[in-house]
Amino acid sequence: MTKPGQDDRGAGDWVTYTPASALRRPWGLVRAMVEDLGRSRGLAWRLLVRDLSSQYRRSLLGVFWAFIPPMVTALGLTLAKNSQVLNIGETDIPYPAYVMFSMALWQTFVEATNRPMQSVIEAKPMLAKINFPREALILAGLGQVCFNFAVKLILILGLFWWFDISASGRAVLAVVPLIHLILLGTGVGLLLTPIGALYEDVSRGLTLIMAVWLLLTPVIFPTPTTGLFATLVRLNPVTPLLVTVRELTIAPGIVSSPLGFGWASGLALGLVLVGWLVYRITMPFVIERMSA
């Protein structure tokens, strides 16, 4: 059937619908995905500006919300550590700085995981009425995550100054594992978006999963070295990425587990590509269900 608009590529005035799956033409699908990614940049920028403006216009404290959670967490855990309620162990830098730095990185991963699903849900009215490259939502979401981390970077720089922490000469390289950490979260988020956009249970369940995931990540404790728990922490793909960011930032800037960083980075890139493919193929059906 031929109708104006409403194809999954957003290209051309007329579209021919066929029962054949897009996966039967893999090269055509890949080409369409890349083309739409390029076409979506302008719209993604406008969506990003709109979302950031809305995010901070509706908040009295604005950007300070990027600082408050890690600061409150660090305060509570430091009090518990000093009173010997928790036996956390020794960290390479003062514990309050360790927790706030690590929490800023963890929050960035959580935001990257939640953002694709939230972007689709928030854009539901627009998706139902307007045909546009849906990659714009993902690019805008990534831009929002990066902007929020840039705000958190002010806190990190303040920590280094307040606690007199020496930065590594290789600190600029920390952007590489940071990007992979964001991509890992985005890949997980893309895989969950099709079902998460239809059922609220997914976002609620993800909140619980993230709480458990945090306990398996060396955010509030140093990386363990022995025992079953240490093995679970090492198998957690967030661990080598987050730890590498921390190690490259703080002097002497030596990466303790380059092999772990390698496999976690590969997993992050693979998840993004698979998640993007799943997102691309399923979005027409998701939009149809959302509009019903």
Image (cartoon, rainbow, N blue to C red):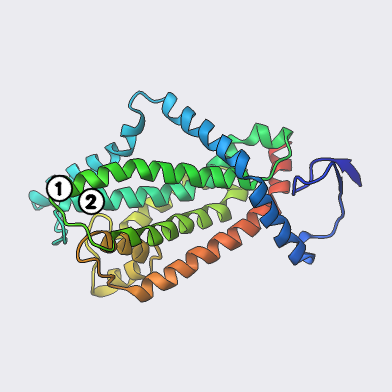
Disc 1 is placed on an element classified as: helix
Between 175 and 22, the residue placed more toward the observer is 175
Question: Could you tell me residue 29's position as x and y percent?
Answer: 74, 60
Residue 84 drawn above or below residue 136: below
* Circle nearer the viewer, 1 or 2: 2
Question: Could you tell me residue 35's position as x and y percent?
Answer: 70, 54
Between 177 and 231, the residue placed more toward the observer is 177
Residue 155 drawn above or below residue 86: above
Residue denoted by label 1: 78
Residue 99: assigned label: 2
Question: Could you tell me residue 188's position as x and y percent?
Answer: 51, 56
For the question of whether residue 78 can be seen, the reply is yes
Question: Could you tell me residue 265's position as x and y percent?
Answer: 45, 67
Between 210 and 132, the residue placed more toward the observer is 132
Give the amino acid at mark 2.
Val
Q: Residue at x 84, y 60 (%)?
A: 20
Callout 1–callout 2 Cβ contact below 8 Å: yes
Q: Is residue 145 left or right of residue 123?
A: left
Q: Residue at x 25, y 70 (%)?
A: 254
For the question of whether residue 216 can be seen, the reply is no
Q: Residue at x 46, y 49 (%)?
A: 112
- Tell me the CA gap for discs 1 and 2: 9 Å
Judged from this view, the residue extending furthest toward the left is 83
